């Protein structure tokens, strides 16, 4: 009986070719089957004649390298040859080469024959929706991110966040990735051109991706912390600074409860002012890291936390365990454990993090107070200064271990005390050295300095996001610091741009304005921008440099009911500019999927059906938040009123019934607030039935408005008819 399967193996790599089904699997030891049931789906010559492999009959198999008895082969190869002399007058071959570099598939013969190879990919031991389709090491000034298992025309690899490894697909031709919801894994499509080049597809494993990129010890982010999604809520420092008090905290918490809680606000952060009154680092007697300022917090911090929690928010607290503005009682008892006395912005007495007293008494007491006072998340500050002072005091500290190991010892002790799931924010990472420490033990890191003024925002927020965004939601959450909207620092366009950046990139959204004083226009920006879209992650594993004049955020959204892009085009300069966006080169969309509807959220207008490039006349500092969705025969949802993400946050399900001509779905809504969907027409003049809640807004686009009475899931439907 003839063998059904042709098989070769080289070290950890294997290929099995099913000669009856004309399909192949690629296996890797420890990884299982990473390519499954891949096959040549079709072939076509320049005359337009098409073929499938079954037309060629049973192939022949030849091997080399893998069966050399006693030899020293450094590769294994197998050729599958289909005789086409009676059909195309030329043979068609598939050759598999296995060596230390990976697996190479070479498509040969066939002359000018084009071919299409498709197959399933499986990379990583987790749910494949957690495996990330990415592009490695590319250049460009756009920020690409994904909500759901999204792919674009640029992506050339699958990244496994469990193991810091990527499966890379390399070719001079064209390879496309796409998530298959029915199969529950990614698929690849490889187009083989009818010419000599581009007929090779290389599959290789790239190890230590993040370790090599950022110089860190890789550690996957813990998804089960205090905040299951990026925290969203008011923070004292940017909003009221040293005017923070029990009264101001609770007044702002009350406004957040009344105006923002239903929209996704979930936290209140009490920052460093609870025992600091200025930047001199010298405190009042009796006010220290264990005792809040009684003038500002007369009832203590626990009373504040209890009232925050009663309003439905998670209380979070700033701590600076390594330094104190006052010589506290524990320092007085253990003066030998004080590393240095030097007034700085954060305090003047610095603990020696290597001393037994700090590790066994001071640090546990600091963490214990956080929980006794009722706070569930921690913002740990003053680390870069402490690390630098550890360098300076190497000879006099208790242990002459490296400064890094000294700080890691403190963080590990804190984690042991706080528990593995307590949300801990590292503040702040001003250098690669800080990033290394943050990634080792924290759930999030503030990635830049203060960002009050616009130029500070460009340098310390936008610039740092470009540099460190690849870490976000993979190793830890990249915290861009506060979103500041008030007129003191922004006109309305600048306010929208700040909020949009944080929201669409899915980063922690810390509200940095006095909510009791914020005008309604700015409050509306908050309502439409929070919460940040959960579980958004990078699509580019790189560290990039920002363009100080412009920014393009391209969020690829993948859902079982559809895929679309949310694009933020931002003019960061103080001059009006004409900005052009190309669907293919800028947004990396598929050229054969167009034309695309482009809808502007804040302008409430459809730019029409675009098949190539469009232009935007951009005022100074402005952002345009666009939905880019391919036109289809059936109606689709282009946008919703709930959130600037054009449905990426609120749409739970969308379906089209061709028998009843009804578009229906479910959405996450805010009760007693009008909820609008922008929908397209269908093929052959299929349009929504006109009514009080359905209006045409031009370009084959309609707005349907509903009036849900309760927060939560809302079911809607829109009936269509033919004009």
Image (cartoon, rainbow, N blue to C red):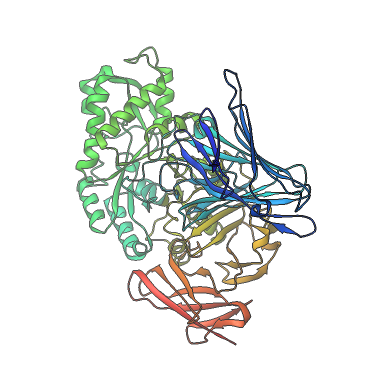
**On-image quarter of the C terminus:** bottom right
Q: Work out whether residue 107 or residue 343 is closer to the camera in this orientation and state it.
A: 107
Residue at image coords 35%, 13%: 396
Q: Work out whether residue 345 or residue 261 is closer to the camera in this orientation and state it.
A: 261
Occupied quadrant, residue 288: top left
Using the rendered image of the protein, determine whether residue 275 is visible from the camera's viewpoint. yes
Q: Work out whether residue 250 or residue 558 is closer to the camera in this orientation and state it.
A: 558
Q: How many marks?
A: 0
Compared to residue 355, the image places residue 186 above or below, namely below
Q: Position of residue 571 (x, y in %)?
A: 63, 55
Q: Position of residue 685 (x, y in %)?
A: 62, 82
Using the rendered image of the protein, determine whether residue 322 is visible from the camera's viewpoint. no
- In this rendering, would 85 be left or right of 453? right
Q: Position of residue 15 (x, y in %)?
A: 55, 37
Residue that lies at the very extreme toward the front in this rendered image? 1
Compared to residue 367, the image places residue 183 above or below, namely below
Q: Position of residue 278 (x, y in %)?
A: 37, 39
Residue at image coords 56%, 74%: 634
Residue that lies at the very extreme toward the top in this rendered image? 395
Q: Work out whether residue 308 or residue 22 is closer to the camera in this orientation and state it.
A: 22
């Amino acid at each position: 009986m003839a063998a059904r399967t042709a098989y070769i193996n080289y070290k950890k790599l294997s290929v099995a070719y099913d000669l009856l089904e004309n399909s192949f699997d690629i296996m890797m030891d420890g990884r299982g089957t990473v390519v499954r049931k891949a096959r040549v789906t079709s072939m076509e010559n320049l005359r337009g004649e098409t073929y499938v492999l079954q037309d060629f009959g049973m192939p022949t198999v030849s091997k080399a390298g893998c069966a050399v008895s006693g030899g020293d082969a450094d590769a294994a190869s197998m050729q599958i040859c289909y005789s086409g002399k009676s059909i195309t007058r030329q043979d068609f071959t598939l050759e598999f080469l296995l060596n230390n570099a990976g697996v190479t598939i070479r498509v040969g013969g066939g002359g000018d024959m084009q071919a299409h190879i498709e197959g399933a990919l499986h990379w990583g031991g987790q749910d494949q929706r957690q495996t990330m389709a990415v592009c490695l090491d590319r250049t460009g000034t756009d920020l690409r991110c994904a909500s759901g298992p999204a792919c674009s025309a640029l992506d050339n690899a699958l990244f496994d966040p469990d193991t810091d490894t990527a499966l890379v697909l390399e070719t001079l031709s064209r390879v496309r990735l796409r998530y298959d919801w029915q199969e529950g894994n990614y698929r690849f499509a490889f187009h083989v051109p009818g010419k000599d080049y581009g007929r090779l597809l290389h599959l290789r494993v790239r190890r230590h991706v993040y370790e090599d990129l950022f110089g860190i010890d890789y550690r996957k982010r813990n998804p089960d912390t205090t905040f299951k999604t990026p925290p969203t809520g008011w923070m004292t420092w940017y909003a009221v600074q040293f005017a923070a008090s029990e009264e101001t905290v609770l007044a702002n918490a009350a406004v957040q409860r009344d105006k923002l809680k239903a929209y996704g606000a979930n936290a209140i952060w009490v920052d460093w002012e609870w025992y600091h009154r200025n930047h001199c680092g010298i405190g009042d007697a009796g006010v220290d890291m264990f005792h809040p300022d009684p003038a500002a917090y007369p009832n203590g911090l626990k009373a504040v936390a209890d009232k925050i929690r009663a309003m439905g928010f998670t209380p979070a607290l700033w701590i600076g365990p390594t330094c104190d503005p006052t010589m506290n009682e524990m320092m007085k008892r253990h003066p030998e454990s004080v590393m240095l006395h030097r007034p700085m912005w954060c305090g003047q007495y610095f603990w020696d993090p290597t001393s037994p007293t700090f590790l066994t008494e001071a640090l546990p007491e600091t963490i214990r107070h956080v929980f006794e006072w009722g706070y569930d998340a921690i913002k740990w500050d003053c680390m870069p200064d402490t690390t630098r002072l550890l360098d300076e005091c190497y000879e006099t500290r208790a242990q002459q271990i490296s400064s890094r190991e000294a700080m890691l010892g403190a963080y590990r002790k804190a984690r042991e005390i706080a528990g593995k799931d307590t949300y801990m924010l590292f503040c702040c990472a001003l250098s690669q050295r800080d990033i290394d420490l943050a990634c080792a033990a924290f759930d999030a890191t503030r990635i830049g300095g203060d960002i009050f003024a616009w130029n500070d925002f460009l340098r310390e927020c936008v610039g740092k996001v470009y540099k460190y965004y690849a870490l976000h939601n993979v190793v830890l959450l990249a915290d861009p610091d506060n979103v500041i909207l008030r007129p003191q620092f922004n006109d309305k366009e600048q306010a929208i741009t700040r909020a949009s950046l944080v929201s669409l990139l899915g980063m922690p959204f810390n509200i940095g304005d006095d909510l009791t004083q914020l005008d309604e226009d700015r409050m509306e920006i908050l309502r439409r921008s929070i919460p940040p879209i959960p579980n958004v992650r990078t699509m580019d594993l790189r560290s990039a440099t920002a363009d100080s004049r412009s920014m393009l955020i391209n969020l690829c959204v993948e859902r079982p009911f559809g895929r679309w892009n949310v694009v933020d085009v931002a003019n960061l300069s103080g001059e009006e500019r004409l900005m052009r966006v190309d669907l293919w080169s800028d947004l990396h969309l598929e050229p054969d999927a167009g034309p695309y509807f482009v809808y502007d959220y804040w302008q409430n207008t459809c730019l029409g059906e675009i098949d190539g490039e469009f232009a935007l006349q951009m005022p100074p500092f402005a952002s345009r938040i666009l939905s880019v969705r391919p036109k289809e025969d059936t109606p689709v949802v282009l946008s919703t009123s709930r959130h600037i993400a054009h449905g990426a946050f609120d749409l739970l399900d969308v379906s089209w019934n061709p028998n009843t001509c009804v578009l229906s779905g479910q959405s996450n809504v805010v009760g007693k607030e009008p909820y609008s969907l922008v929908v397209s027409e269908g093929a052959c003049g299929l349009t929504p039935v006109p009514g009080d809640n359905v209006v045409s807004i031009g370009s084959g686009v309609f707005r349907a408005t509903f009036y849900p009475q309760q927060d939560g899931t809302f079911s809607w439907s829109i009936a269509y008819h033919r004009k």
